[in-house]
Image: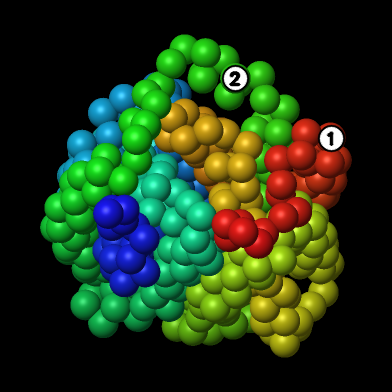
Amino acid sequence: MIRKKLSDSAAMRWLALVIVAATMMFGYFFTDVMSPLEPLLTASPEQGGLGWTSDEYGFFSGSYGFFNVFLGLLFVGGIILDRFGIRFTGTMSTLLMFAGALIKWYAVGHPFEGQFMGYGMQVIVACLGFAVYGVGCEIAGITVSKVIVKWFTGHELALAMGVQVGLARLGTAAALSLALPFATKMGSAAASVGLGAAMLCIGVLAFLVYNVMDSRLDRTSQAADSAPEESLKWSDIVYLVTNRGFWYIALLCLMFYGGVFPFLKFATRIMVVKYGVDESVAGSIPSMLPYGTIVLTPLFGYIYDKVGKGATLMIIGSLLLTFVHTMFAMPHGTVVMAVAMMVVLGVAFGLVPSAMWPSVPKIIPMQVLGTAYALIFYIQNIGLSLIPIWIGKVNQANTDPATGIIDYTQTMSIFAAFGVVSIVISILLWIEDRRKGYGLEKSNISGK
């Protein structure tokens, strides 16, 4: 009798996806819970704010990736994942997320005296918590990516990754839409941060439930397969770092996400300052982007599964990213234009991730996949750490000292430049796929 793997059951593999995707959805809520709070954070204490400067807010936003980038902890996490497995790594990473969230919650809710490196101690402690959280969240991200490949290879891989990304964007959208009204109603920015920390506690429990399913999958896989899964070897890492296609994916991730996530950190205030949107609803315009990708990313993933064209989807998404930021860089605009550009950016943000993440297993073998995702996320974290700091300083330099109004032309031109580089890299990846035959333009479903 031929034994089937647990992953051959559609109900079981989609249940596993929902559990791990929910954990990441709570994580993305916490990642962006402070983004719409910038007007509250930078307001003076007399106005009910925390009195942070634009420079301090930019430094805080970049602190997410400090430990990942400067201590290399994310890359270490990828090696841990490939050596010690999904269950150990996932539990470790979700606990780190929760611990970092508690530190950040405490920092935002309590006053601190003194300064360090020119920044207030409250900012520094909040950065510490966000950096610890960032280590956990990024390692959890690569773990969930390997979970999906493990359960969905030969099945609806791109659709599954699209659903996971879509739910993650739901977390981002909820943060952008709800964090400021909730903080205002509760009378404290710490209230929204505490809500996010509570969600992460649920995420830890959810991953513990997944561990039971993962153990069952391993048992059924061993019964169904004659050959055990290969373990990580030094030659696998050499293959990874010398693979040109892998580096194109990694650099595309850096440039494309560098043009989206850091932009969202500042988008709420851009809507207020440049387009005159009321602070109470300004976060709803940036939130249109992740809400749109909730539907679009799975849709484009489904298209990739059925008809392929992954490299082409990445090129189109990069073109749209460049167009949107070029329009935002124009000196004049209306709220209607801003809304329209957010819709277009949502399409771009659905296209590239839905094709990029399922393309990695076509280039890199399973035994080094965790390390591959870790290295990509590590490079991405360089952008997530340094770009917000850079943008915060650019905004500070372009602030009128008399009125406090920021000229965002230079800021948006920088984001547009990221889009241009993304186009070039996407085209190079398309050429490399034609040379090496990775199958990025082919369907993901076995037999298609």
Q: Position of residue 301 (x, y in %)?
A: 59, 66
- Please name the amino acid that badge 1 sits on: Arg
Asked whether residue 346 is in view, the answer is yes
Specify the quadrant that holds the C terminus.
bottom right
Q: Residues within 10 Å of mark 2 (few under 14, many from 20)?
A: some
Going by the image, does 74 lie left or right of 112?
Answer: right
Kind of element beneath mark 2: helix
Front in this rendered view, residue 371 or 13 = 13
Q: Are marks 1 and 2 in contact (CB under 8 Å)?
A: no
The residue singled out by tag 2 in the image is 239
Q: Secondary structure at mark 1?
A: helix
Name the residue at the top extreme: 234
Q: Residue at x 47, y 35 (%)?
A: 366
The residue located at (34%, 35%) in the rendering is 226
Residue extending furthest bottom?
A: 336
- Disc ID at residue 435: 1
Q: Which corner quadrant of the image does residue 274 belong to?
A: bottom right
The spot of residue 164 in percent (x, y) is 43, 63
